[in-house]
Image: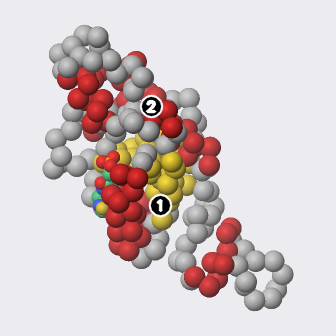
Amino acid sequence: MTGLHASAGSGPDMSPAAHLSLPLTISETEDNMKKAIYPGSFDPVTYGHIDIIHRAASIFDELTVSVLNNKEKSPLFSVEERVKMLKEVTEALPNVKVESFSGLLIDYARSKDVHVSVRGLRAITDFEYELQIAQTNKLLSAGELDTVFLTTSLEYAYLSSSSVKEIATFNGDISKCVPPSVAALVYAKYGHRTGV
Ligand code: PNS
């Protein structure tokens, strides 16, 4: 046994996981790295997302920020644009990769041999939605994909991609919500050169 399941000595395995018969643990990936996925729409990436990325990147050996390519939603930015923005704002983080995915998160995670999904929790209002996604993924993956929640730092608790878009529609100030490079692209989508 490896990682979290390891037990001392040659006696019976008394670790808590031994009684739960978990199929996999965070450390039981093929290369024994602690890997995680941070999935989302990121339309656009906000300082709240960036805060979660920094903190998750300090917890896991490798973090893949994964943009959902959902043809049913009509996002402001294309998947390519969102991936590009995310790559720019994470370029200083060597253990962070940015990709896109389509279909079920559990299939994508399995294809990457990743067993942890990271999500940010801003407020109690997020909880029901996040719990539903986490439990669905756990069920669909037969326990192979777990979700780790990071509570959003207080200064970003009010932030959402939707509110950024709404403010920018009316040429309001989004400088406290997104990095300058992202703000310029958001304003451009609405035909504004800058905010306020
Ligand atoms: O940023 P978002 O839009 O809240 O992210 C939602 C996301 C991408 C995490 C979720 O919609 C997702 O994982 N979609 C992929 C499809 C899937 O796996 N659905 C089953 C779980 S509900």
As rendered, which of 31 and 158 lies closer to the eye? 158
Q: Secondary structure at mark 2?
A: helix
The image shows residue 167 at horizontal and vertical percentages of 26, 25
Does 15 sit left or right of 109 as displayed?
Answer: right
Identify the residue at horizontal 42%, vertical 76% (top origin): 142
Give the amino acid type for the residue marked by disc 2 in the picture: Tyr
Does 88 sit left or right of 56 as displayed?
Answer: left
For disc 1, does the CB lie below 8 Å from ligand 1?
Answer: no
As rendered, which of 102 and 156 lies closer to the eye? 156
The image shows residue 29 at horizontal and vertical percentages of 57, 64
In the picture, the quarter occupied by the C terminus is top left
Task: Decide: is 30 above or below 43.
Answer: below
As drawn, the label of residue 47 is: 2
N-term mark: 1 or 2: 2
The image shows residue 178 at horizontal and vertical percentages of 39, 26
Residue 110 quadrant? bottom left
- The local crowd at label 1, few if under 14, some if 14 to 19, many if 20 or more residues have their Cα within 10 Å, is many
Q: Is there any visible trace of residue 38 in the rendered image?
A: no
Residue 74 quadrant? top left
Task: Decide: is 187 above or below 142.
Answer: above
- The CA span between labels 1 and 2 is 21 Å
As drawn, the label of residue 147 is: 1
Identify the residue at horizontal 47%, vertical 61% (top origin): 147
The quadrant of the rendered image in which ligand 1 is seen is: bottom left
